[in-house]
Amino acid sequence: MGKENIRADFPRAERRLRLGIVGGGTGSFIGQVHARGARLSNRWDVVAGALSSRPEVAQESGRAWLFDEERIYTDYRTMAQREASRPDGIDAVAITTPNNSHHAIACAFMENGIDIISDKPLTTTLDDALDLVRRQRSTGLVFGVTYAYAASAMVRQARQMVREGMLGTLKQVHVEYFQEWALAPTGAGARWRVNPSIVGPTFTTGDIGTHCHHLGAFVCGRPLTAVRAEFHTLGTPKMLEDTAFMHVRYDGDIPGTIMISQVAPGAHCGLRIRIFGDQASLEWNQEKPEVLHFCRFGEPARLLTRGEGAGIGMHAARFVHLPRGHPEALSDAWGNLYEEFAIAIETRRLGRTLPEGLLEYPTVVDGALGVKFIEAALASSQSGGGWTDCSLPISDAISIADM
């Protein structure tokens, strides 16, 4: 079935799937985000976890999360083995740990036949990222990566409008993401994010630049092919960059820019994308996620708001949960993402098939493309800002929801 004929509704769940979490213990923000998104989708029960590498924190956190005592683990390898052997074992694991542990944790669970949901960036090296791609392809397991902004209803609306040619021929793609928190980084979470032995060779490019990389390619339906980057450290002294400015190229030689900083005073979570065609433009700002700006050349601008009908396409309509005027935001996007993960995992486990293009969740290949982007941007900056290739050295690596 072609993408233009996809039904708007998702298949009903056979049962709630069982989710385990690695990481996310006391003081962790992202583990709770995963758990809440999973629960909000109404397709998951969160039942087990190795919530910290420190045994006492893992035990304390597991009890706080109301896990049964035998499903509170202090080691992820033990968790993978024991959950795989249980008749009611987890269907998937969410990896919410620092970057340098993603590869080893994913391998442990994949070796036990458990589907994967991983934070981004996928890994700290391209070799590790490509290894996970190969493992996924050899096992057939579902491997999702949490670029959650792409599961916002109006991002799906923008993607559909681009795909349907409503902007005409694409001419420019611009993505920016500005934050201020690294002006005064505090707490353990902030410290590890600027430690290259934990996060890899970049700070801001890996942390929020990968969101820009994925979002631009996802909405315009074209892979990012090359980057020319300048890295800067503009806040307190640190070993890694906190700001980067990039010229980029998308497939078809479409020019664009990516601008990122985590030391921009007054900026909280300023992710914005603008796409210009030769007939019209689109703009979306994640701090105002309900609204999509659409403007045709020579005509009054239109504001499309999330809701049923009134120009909202089927890809966005799947993620409309409340009538207009009742705001939905990032927490709902996480729920949308976990709904897609659940459908993919249930489909695989039941041996079923889905209509082509029904699901558009980020995959392990998208994660690997993000790691390639990190390494290419770093190499470009180190070479004085030369153009650097962003393609993956692996066959048939298209992804970004099959473009």
Image (cartoon, rainbow, N blue to C red):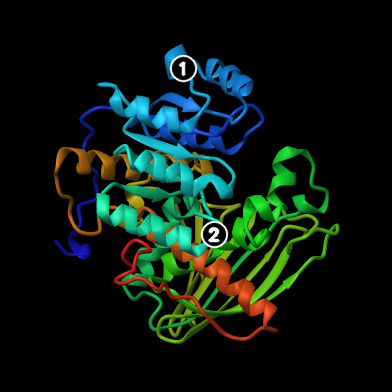
Of residues 79 and 61, which is closer to you in this image? 79
Residue 166 appears in the rendering:
yes
* Residue that badge 1 annotates: 67
Badge 1 element: loop
Residue 280, percent from left and from top = 45, 78
Which residue occupies the foreground of this view, 310 or 208?
A: 208
Residue type beneath disc 1 = Phe
Marks 1 and 2 sit apart, C-alpha to C-alpha, by 32 Å
Q: How many tags in the picture?
A: 2
- Residue 353 on image: x %, y %: 15, 49
Q: Mark 2 = which residue?
A: 211
Examine the rendering and report whether any part of residue 302 can be seen.
Answer: no
Q: Kindly state the secondary structure of the residue where label 2 is placed.
A: helix
Residue 100 rendering spot, x and y as whole percentages: 57, 49
Callout 2 amino acid:
His
> Closer to the N terminus: mark 1 or mark 2?
1
- Of circles 1 and 2, the one toward us is 1
Give the answer, above or below, for where 46 lies relative to 264: above
Q: Are marks 1 and 2 in contact (CB under 8 Å)?
A: no
At a point 36% along the width and 29% down the height, the residue shown is 81
Q: Few, some or many C-alpha atoms within 10 Å of disc 2 (few <14, some 14-19, many ≥20)?
A: many
396 or 346, nearer to the observer: 396
354 to 176, vertically: above or below: above
Side (left or right) of 141 relative to 70 = left
